[in-house]
Image (cartoon, helix red, strand yellow):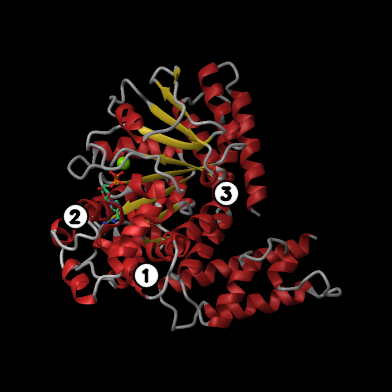
């Protein structure tokens, strides 16, 4: 389904390129878009300053590449992408590319380069031989400013949209600014037709409320409230709490850090409890001398209070080595959940996301350089967009996956299947495997359609669920239409 969508989008892109072949700037730009189809999917990591973007990027990559705690005025988009050797490329606004000679990637060098103004440096590209970057390229966008949401928001937004196939948006609290930003992304016609590319990460979730060992439960409840909000639901497919700091620390934990934590875990419970009462006490109290204050302060910076509390709990519960502690803390950071969502939502659906990006690019060109004779291209663009049922199916599948839409169990799994989750062809959608002998597909499709039509008037469904039912009904109608044609 989405493969066909991608082929059609690609064909439209090539026709548009041919149509503008006498305009080198436009056709070169479009060619770049075509070449991107052979490169990893691009995911923008966006959100306000200090929402934890750099930390989360490091957690996702599994290495410390991105400088954390950057200054507010950082305006440079930074690309983290796969390369066989460490490499830093500086792109100027005029299209020149400079290679900064490096043998290793250190965050201080990258931080210095990020201090340049956007009229001096348009983009930084950091290439690293990190396995985590083989399927995706991560783009850290400048922080969406709270005060200047109109302008900064808009220019950051323009960047995000032109550079990325999908967006991972970080927010510490469901804030008005964030909603405004996400809504303005959503205002574009295409974004509305295909709202399939946004995941919201509830970042720094360990700082929710009082910050005890169970703080993630509170964060999860908050995320659920956010998921239930119809405005949020209209543009984001997932809302996931995550502790980027702990994700980063668990993956880069050293043997010394492990030993220091293990040393602390051996202290009597009452001393530990007193130590963990506040961050301040933990980092500066003179006792215990076995683990000196400066070591504790460093641990606190790296793991956060939640991370330390969880680590000590694991160690006291019998986790005995570095590897075991790593995986327990990774679990506690919820990075795995986020990674899974990124995989299911973005990597697995990359054909649809890439098709969407191509349509955006064609739209930009047709709008920006109108010329006689382009009606046909425009017609094809509109046609691809209006065939939005494919987008709708993807969107509903995400809502089913994230729990935003929940049917009774039997309907739920049938909806999945009919929407193409287990295979796009008619047989898979109707639930016949290849061993089924001549099933009467037309009959079965008609029966399923009749059942789902009944659901459209089920008074137990709220509006969102009725809409979802209508999408499944349309999928059934299409199955029947395919049978008639076949
Ligand atoms: N407690 C806690 N602190 C975090 C977390 N993620 C980031 N931070 C801290 O927040 C500050 C800003 O993080 P950074 O990743 O640079 O944010 P950015 O400006 O969005 O790139 C740094 O001091 C991080 O250590 C987290 O999950 N938990
Ligand atoms: Mg940053």
User: Which image quarter is the C terminus in?
Assistant: bottom right
Q: In which of the image's four quarters is ligand 2 placed?
A: top left
Inter-mark Cα distance, 1 to 2: 20 Å
Inter-mark Cα distance, 2 to 3: 48 Å
Between 467 and 219, the one lying in front of the other is 219
**Percent x, y for residue 166?**
46, 47
Question: Reading the chain from its start, which is encountered first: label 1 or label 3?
Answer: 1
Q: Which circle marks residue 315 in the picture?
A: 1
- According to the picture, the residue beneath numbered tag 3 turns out to be 350
- According to the picture, the residue beneath numbered tag 2 turns out to be 293
Q: Which residue sits at x=52%, y=77%?
A: 456
| Left or right of residue 155: residue 91 | right
Whether disc 2's CB lies below 8 Å from ligand 1 is answered no
Q: Which residue sits at x=64%, y=31%?
A: 14
Contact check, label 1 and label 2, Cβ < 8 Å: no
- Name the mark nearer the viewer: 2 or 3: 2
Which image quadrant is residue 236 in? bottom left
Contact check, label 2 and label 3, Cβ < 8 Å: no
Contact check, label 1 and label 3, Cβ < 8 Å: no
Q: How many labels does the image show?
A: 3
Which image quadrant is residue 242 in? bottom left
Q: Can residue 56 be seen by looking at this rendering?
A: yes
> Of helix, strand and loop, which one carries label 1?
helix
Crowding near pointer 2: few (<14 within 10 Å), some, many (20+)?
some
Q: Which circle marks residue 471 in the picture?
A: none
> Of helix, strand and loop, which one carries label 3?
helix
Question: Reading the chain from its start, which is encountered first: label 2 or label 3?
Answer: 2
Between 185 and 388, the one lying in front of the other is 185
């Amino acid at each position: 389904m989405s493969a066909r969508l991608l082929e059609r989008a690609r064909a439209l892109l090539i026709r548009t390129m041919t149509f503008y072949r006498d305009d080198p700037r436009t056709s070169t730009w479009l060619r770049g878009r075509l070449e991107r189809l052979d490169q990893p999917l691009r995911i923008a990591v966006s959100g306000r300053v200090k929402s934890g973007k750099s930390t989360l990027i490091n957690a996702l990559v599994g290495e410390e590449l991105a400088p954390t705690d950057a200054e507010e005025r950082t305006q440079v988009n930074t690309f983290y992408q796969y390369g066989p050797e460490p490499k830093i490329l500086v792109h100027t606004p005029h299209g020149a590319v400079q290679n900064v000679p490096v043998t290793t990637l250190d965050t201080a060098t990258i931080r210095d380069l990020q201090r340049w103004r956007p009229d001096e440096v348009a983009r930084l590209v950091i290439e690293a031989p990190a396995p985590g970057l083989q399927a995706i390229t991560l783009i850290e966008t400048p922080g969406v400013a709270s005060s200047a949401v109109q302008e900064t928001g808009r220019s950051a937004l323009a960047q995000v949209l032109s550079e990325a196939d999908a967006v991972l948006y970080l927010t510490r609290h469901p804030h008005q600014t964030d909603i405004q930003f996400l809504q303005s992304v959503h205002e574009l016609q295409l974004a509305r037709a295909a709202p399939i590319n946004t995941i919201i990460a509830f970042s720094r979730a360990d700082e929710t409320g009082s910050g005890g060992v169970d703080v993630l439960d509170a964060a999860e409840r908050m995320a659920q409230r956010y998921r239930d909000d119809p405005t949020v639901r209209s543009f984001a497919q997932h809302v996931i709490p995550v502790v980027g700091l702990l994700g980063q620390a668990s993956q880069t934990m050293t043997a010394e850090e492990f030993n220091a934590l293990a040393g602390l875990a051996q202290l009597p419970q009452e001393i530990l409890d007193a130590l963990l009462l506040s961050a301040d006490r933990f980092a500066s109290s003179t006792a215990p001398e076995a683990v000196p204050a400066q070591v504790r302060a460093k641990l606190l910076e790296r793991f956060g209070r939640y991370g330390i509390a969880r680590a000590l709990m694991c160690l006291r519960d019998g986790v005995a080595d570095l590897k075991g502690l790593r995986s327990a803390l990774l679990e506690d950071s919820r990075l795995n959940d986020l990674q899974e969502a990124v995989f299911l939502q973005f990597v697995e659906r990359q054909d649809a996301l890439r098709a969407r990006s191509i349509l955006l690019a064609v739209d930009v060109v047709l709008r920006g350089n109108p010329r006689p004779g382009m009606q046909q291209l425009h017609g094809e663009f509109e046609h691809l967009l209006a065939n939005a049922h494919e987008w709708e199916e993807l969107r509903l599948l995400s809502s089913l996956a994230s729990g935003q839409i929940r049917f009774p169990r039997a309907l739920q799994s049938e909806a999945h299947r009919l929407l193409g989750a287990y295979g796009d062809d008619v047989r898979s959608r109707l639930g016949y495997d290849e061993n089924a002998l001549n099933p009467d597909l037309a009959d079965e499709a008609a029966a399923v359609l009749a059942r789902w039509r009944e659901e459209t008037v089920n008074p137990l469904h709220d509006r969102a669920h009725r809409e979802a039912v209508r999408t499944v009904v349309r999928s059934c109608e299409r199955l029947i239409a395919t049978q008639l044609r076949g």
